[in-house]
Amino acid sequence: MVYYRLNVKRFLSEDKIRYTAYGINVIRRDNGECIGCVDDVFIDRENALRFIEKINRYRLSPLHLMDVIEDEFALITKCNKTVEKQGQG
């Protein structure tokens, strides 16, 4: 069994702009060892924490982590496009 924990890293973009990004560490429950991570997933800390809380609540298998991240961004993109259309009408 695993749980997920926030990781915070600082990066330098191709345009030489520094930014903070939030990722996800995969932690073994039995010994606390980090067995994997996905860096630079979110730029908003609160969104990252909400996402991690949700995948911990549902006890997501690490096998499905990348698919769930992709689904989350597809949903965010769809919501942003809906908001933009509403603002135009």
Image (cartoon, rainbow, N blue to C red):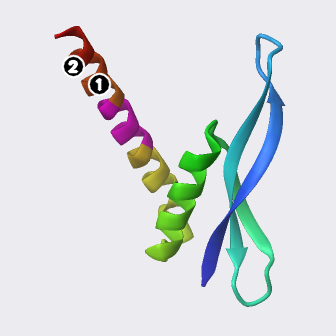
Mark 1: amino acid: Val
Give the residue drawn at x 35%, y 27%: 80
Going by the numbered disc 2, the residue's amino acid type is Gln
Quick check: 58 left or right of 40?
left
6 to the left or right of 81? right
| Mark 1, secondary structure of its residue | helix
Give coordinates of residue 54: x percent, y percent. Answer: 47, 65
Give the extent of the magenta segment: 73-79
Q: Position of residue 20 (x, y in %)?
A: 76, 35
Q: Nearer the viewer, residue 86 or 48?
A: 86
Question: Residue 86's quadrant in the figure?
Answer: top left
- SS at mark 2 in the image: helix
Please tell me whether the stretch drawn in magenta is mainly helix, strand or loop: helix
Q: Is residue 20 above or below residue 29?
A: above
- Relative horizontal placement of residue 78, taking residue 2 as reference (left or right): left
Q: Is 11 situated above or below 41?
A: above
In this figure, which residue is indicated by the disc labeled 1? 83
Residue shown at 78% from the left, 70% from the top: 34
Q: Is residue 39 visible?
A: no
Q: How many numbered marks, from 0 up?
A: 2
